Amino acid sequence: MDCLSLWLHSFIPESVRWLLKKGRQTEAREILSKVARLNGKEMPSEKLCLPKRERLGDFRDLFSSVKMAHKTLGVWFMW
């Protein structure tokens, strides 16, 4: 099983968001170019950037709505 995971890992690209956070613009652009090509689109020439301010979630988000609370409790009870 571990060999299969290692083999599949070589086909799955790194997260574009993570690459941008690490300052690896070129690699992020290459991945997005491949995705655009697969979708039959053209990659825009604009600079890639992350949002200025990211909101990190907290515990309250698990109960932000009735539907979300239902999903949260369901997963907790199944676990």
Image (tube, helix red, strand yellow):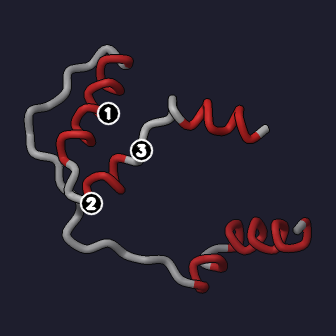
**Amino acid type assigned to the residue bearing label 1 in the image:** Ile
- Quadrant for the C terminus, please: bottom right
Disc number placed over residue 31 in the picture, else none: 1
Query: Cβ–Cβ below 8 Å for labels 3 and 2?
Result: no
Q: CA distance from mark 2 to mark 1?
A: 15 Å
> Looking at the image, which residue is at 20% across and 57% down?
23
Residue at which label 2 appears: 22
**In the figure, residue 33 lies in which quadrant?**
top left
Please state the horizontal and vertical placement of residue 60, each as a whole percent of the image.
59, 85
The answer to whether the residue labelled 1 contacts the one labelled 3, judged by CB atoms less than 8 Å apart, is: yes
Closer to the camera: disc 2 or disc 1?
Answer: 2
Question: In this picture, is 10 found above or below 53?
Answer: above
Give the mark nearest the N terminus, 3 or 2: 3
In whole angstroms, how far apart are the C-alphas of marks 1 and 3?
8 Å
Q: Callout 1: helix, strand or loop?
A: helix
Element type at marker 2? loop
In this picture, is 53 found above or below 35?
Answer: below
Q: Residues within 10 Å of mark 2 (few under 14, many from 20)?
A: few
Question: Residue 57: x and y, percent?
Answer: 49, 77
Name above or below for residue 27 compared with residue 69. above
| Residue underneath mark 3 | 14
